[in-house]
Every structure is written in structure tokens, then in C-alpha cells.
Amino acid sequence: MKSSKKTITAVLLAAAFMVAGCGDSLYVLTPEEEDAVISYASRVVAKYNTYQQDGEIFVMKEVLDGENAAENPAEENVPAEESAENTEALDMQEETDTPEQKSPDTDTSQSSATISEALNLGKVQASYTGSSLCATYAQSDVYAVDAKAGHQLLVVNVDLSSEETKDLHLDILKMKPSIQIIINETETAMAETTILPNDLSTFQGDVKAGQKSGTVLLFEISNEIQEITSLQLKINLDGENHTVNL
């Protein structure tokens, strides 16, 4: 170690003597010359430094500046137009990820129709013939429908007929229509499902040529309704809604 220190001192004195001269003003080194002297001195130190295994590696200033820039990258200047596009895309993504809030269901597929059209009866005509209120409806002595306590039955009478010369078969039970009634524009009720042979909502049978077949729709409603001023049927068949004004 002492030998390396002596060598460094000798090199520096030699350099000072060479540039100083005798009686002349001190020579000022250029930056390139200073770098050369420093590089040479570093190599001499590294050569005699037994603790340095890899020796001295010279790194140019330009390379060092590049490494510093890589370690501390400056923020890229994004053009204003590109930034606006990125912001808009992000907003669209947020709208897509946000669950869509659906408005309450509104039935826009309803259409005004006759009972025949709503039930898709084809050549069979269904005609409303009136309504009545009762506590019990009996089509025969075998089977009767009773209203529960505090309620009554609204009976809607519908005649089926055909002008064809042959009998026409109907299977409304298989069609599974959903039938609702609106009473006096305020009260609603669903049609009762019964095993009455003349229940229109479950009718299975033939409509005789040139004859009428009497059928009914039964609705259980409150006893508070004493007068019927208007009736309206809401019929849903195969996903299609129809309104029938009686």
C-alpha cells in the first residue's frame, strides 16, 4: 500500500513539473486533459490495490448519464389529444363495468283484440254474453266452485260458435293462457283454474257446427264489490299480451 501511495505521488509531481515549467505561469488543463490524468491515476491505484479483484473500469460520462436516466425515467409527455382519448376510453370501460340499472318493466307489446284473437281460436268465434256475482257456481250437481270467506265469484259468460260445416276441436288447456281481469278499472283478479267442463281457460272439446257452446271464466273477488261498471281482460298467450274490452 505504501508503494502505491509513493507511485501516485511521483506521478502527480511529474505531471505538475511538466506543465509548470520554470518561471512560467501555471498551465491550465483542459477538461479532456484532466480526464486523462484522472483516468491514468485511477488505473495506477487499481493496479497496486490488492483488495480490488476486478480492476478499474472506465465509464464514459455519456454512458453514465444514460444509466442515470434509465434509473430515474422522466414522465413521458403524452399529447393532449391522446390523453383525452385515453380518458374517454377509461370512462367507457367504467360504464361497461357498472351494472346497468334497468327501469321498471313496461309492457309495450299489448294490443287490443277480441277473445278469439287473444286465444288464437282460429275459425271459432268467442262472444262475451254477460257477467254475474255469486257465492257458489255449480255447472252440475257433481261439481261446484265456492268462494272463500269474505269473497265472491265473478262469472264471465262466453259463447263459442263456428260457421263451419263441420265440428272444430279446441284444446285451450294445452295452450296454457294466462287470463286476468280488471274490474271497475281498479280491482284485479286472476282466472280460477277449475275442472269444470265449460271452463274456457281449460276447455277441451268440440265446437259443434252451427251451434253455440256456453263457457265461463271464474274470478274470485272481494265482497266489497257490489256493482260492475266495467270489465277488461288481460290475456297472455305464448308471450304476447292482449287487452280485451268486454
Image (cartoon, rainbow, N blue to C red):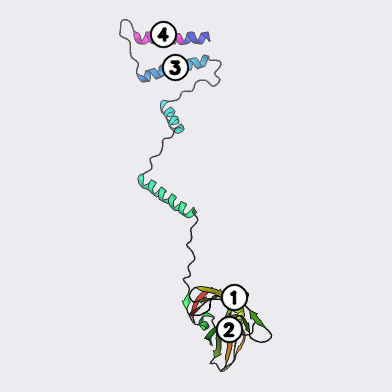
Given the image, on which type of amino acid does mark 4 rest?
A: Leu
**Residues at marks 4 and 3 touching, judged by CB atoms closer than 8 Å:** no
Q: Residue at x 61, y 79 (%)?
A: 174
| First in residue order: circle 2 vs circle 3 | 3
Given the image, on which type of amino acid does mark 2 rest?
A: Val
Q: Callout 3 environment at 10 Å: few (<14), some (14 to 19), or many (20+)?
A: some
Residue 151: give x, y in percent of width and height: 59, 75
Comparing 158 with 34, the one in front is 158
Q: In 3D space, how far apart are the residues under numbered discs 2 and 1 (Cα atoms)? A: 18 Å
Q: What SS does tag 1 mark? A: strand
Give the quadrant of residue 77. Answer: top left
Residue 89: give x, y in percent of width and height: 43, 51
| First in residue order: circle 4 vs circle 1 | 4
Given the image, on which type of amino acid does mark 3 rest?
A: Tyr
Question: In this figure, which residue is indicated by the disc labeled 3?
Answer: 40
Q: Callout 2 environment at 10 Å: few (<14), some (14 to 19), or many (20+)?
A: many
| First in residue order: circle 4 vs circle 2 | 4
- Residue 173 in magenta stretch: no
Given the image, on which type of amino acid does mark 1 rest?
A: His
Question: In this figure, which residue is indicated by the disc labeled 1?
Answer: 151
Q: In 3D space, how far apart are the residues under numbered discs 1 and 3 (Cα atoms)? A: 114 Å
Question: In this figure, which residue is indicated by the disc labeled 4?
Answer: 13
Rendered view: 109 above or below 205: above
Question: In this figure, which residue is indicated by the disc labeled 2?
Answer: 216
| First in residue order: circle 4 vs circle 3 | 4
Rendered view: 153 above or below 48: below
- Residue 22 in magenta stretch: yes
Q: In 3D space, how far apart are the residues under numbered discs 4 and 1 (Cα atoms)? A: 123 Å
